[in-house]
Amino acid sequence: MKRHILLLLACLILSISKTAAARYSGSRIFWDSRSPVTVFSSGGYARIIELSDGRLMACCESGGIKVSFSTNKGKSWSSPKLIAPNYNDTPNCVPDLVQLADGTIIVGYNPRPSQPYTEDRRFGIRVRRSTDGGRNWSDEIFVYDADFTFENGCWEPSFLQLPSGELQLYFADESPYTSSGEQQISLCRSFDGGLTWTSPQRISYRSGFRDGMPVPVLLADQKNIVVAIEDNGWDGIGDFVPTTVRVSLSNNWANGAYVNGTSTNRNRSINYDYCPVAKGGAPYLRVLPGGETVLSHQSRYGESDNMKMYVYVGNKQAKDFKAMSKPFNQGTTKGCWWNSLAVIDTGIVVAVGGLDGKIVMAKGYPMKQFLAPYSTPLVDGRLTSDDAYCHASAKQIPMGCETGTFSYTDFAYDDAYLYMTSQVFRTHASSEEPYPDGINLYVDNKGAATNAPASSSRMYRILPDGSLTASRGTGSRWQETEIEGVIVESSQTATGYRIEIAIPWTAIGLSAMPTTGNISINLETIISGSDGQTVEHIPDASGTKPSTWMPLKLLEPDPTGCLPPTPSPRGRGLSYGISGQPIQPNRQGIHIENARKILRR
């Protein structure tokens, strides 16, 4: 008997281990890039920073080095100003910019002589300074010269100012290796705000390969410098890979310290088992206000051979990068080259890409959870200010960069219902089988950390015409189930369709409105085609793995409100009874938001 019990326990543990999983708790970036903003009408290698006065400043290479400014967080940009013109048949390229603690703005760039090469024109690094907010610029300041041929040049300057005031300038340098194709990362320092610079020192080098395109950051712990580079020396890959090299701030590359090819301070950023498209160069690294890190790179790998920009979120140590996303929908005909990232405002991520010869930007919103305010929207497939979803325009969750069909989704809740609204920008959406469009909403009432649909999991598929099916998890798969009192409404708009849904808490397996934060959510947008369907999901989420879903935080009710204890939504939507058949909605009664206004008078 004892042996039999132990065997049963072993089988139970094995069964649980197959479905149990660690919940992903990092941020994911949701890109609102339906209409990317043009920063420069032509150019390449653009970079953006936020200045201390709240303006955004951008620079790029375009017939020299140009800068532009935005006073409205990137909605529009000033006419470009040329601050470093080309001369002597030597184009100035690949700028970077930084604002120092004292307000000085510095732009660095990379003179690259054109052929035929002559010894008097060398590849190098130069900077210019502005002490009046970017209105006027100094003469060119010398930092470094490499050789005069392309094979032995230097490349891609990038800045970091330390808390001590020391200004560091990192760049890729192959001039020490005139008899090979090797390349190192070098560092020059300035202790007077960029007026003078030290000779370069090596800080990263893998023998026989080419470390390149450095981008340094100081981590939120203020104890470690991490530099993102491209590294083509990893075994078995045969391509550049986003990589980090690092040193403690207390060491600060002292005594000739550098990271070689076998150092534990050299880390491949992205796990190939997790993300097979992680090959590619041109990395860019930034730190979020909460300490997490964001990394981008360009890659030809994926659904086509066009160069694309990929963005990942890493932990506070700039490791374990996951939640891959693409800021721009490029289709199959557009390349996105030499991209960068900025973090502005209260943590908005700005992606800057060279798309079809123009420099464009899009904003991304890092989220660890979705939010739902206490409110009772009118379920009518429309949006008014009285609906009071989380975002004023119900745009909490933007999606669409994978498929090009953009959407906005938002949530609300009250004592009886969970509400969702989605606006989908697709004018020819179909509800016809076998390949209808629609939205998949997944809800788990326990926040289950499993790799299979749990008994606490529900899935609702809503078509553009308001048709609805529901499924429940069995512990191993989805099984269609009855629809219990759900109300749905849809409406066609000039740009697509909008759906609204009200789901009773009882329909997702709860006896009442939850009082603890154990709800998790997943979203999918379904796009139909002549030969099947394309599904876009939130980054790193799978419809069959609740452990990958996002927490939904129910915000506390407004204590000044006068809501009745059990509000009930009203609208023209289809109401689904216990049989799963739509029934006519109850049109009597007053919309709860109007009731609130009456009670407050």
Image (cartoon, rainbow, N blue to C red):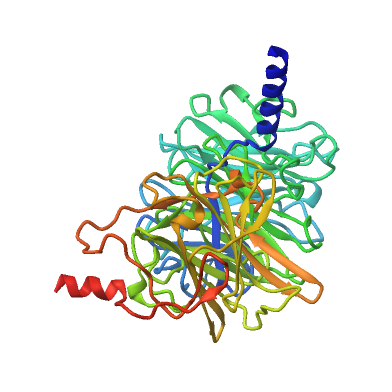
Q: Residue furthest left?
A: 601
Residue 90 in view of the camera = no
Q: Nearer the viewer, residue 311 or 490?
A: 490
Question: Residue 65: image x %, image y %?
Answer: 58, 64
Q: Looking at the figure, which quarter contains the C terminus?
A: bottom left
Residue 447 in view of the camera = yes
Q: Looking at the figure, which quarter contains the N terminus?
A: top right
- Left or right, 99 with reference to 469: left
User: Residue at the spot x=39%, y=52% of the render?
Assistant: 512
Q: Nearer the viewer, residue 461 or 532?
A: 461
Question: Residue 564: image x %, image y %?
Answer: 25, 63
Question: Residue 432: image x %, image y %?
Answer: 70, 79
Total numbered circles: 0
User: Residue at the spot x=52%, y=47% of the render?
Assistant: 27
User: Residue at the spot x=27%, y=59% of the render?
Assistant: 565
* Corner quadrant of residue 144: top right
Q: Nearer the viewer, residue 414 or 584?
A: 584
Q: Nearer the viewer, residue 9 or 277?
A: 9
Question: Residue 420: image x %, image y %?
Answer: 47, 65
Q: Is residue 353 above or below residue 423?
A: above
Q: Residue furthest bottom?
A: 494
User: Residue at the spot x=77%, y=40% of the render?
Assistant: 210
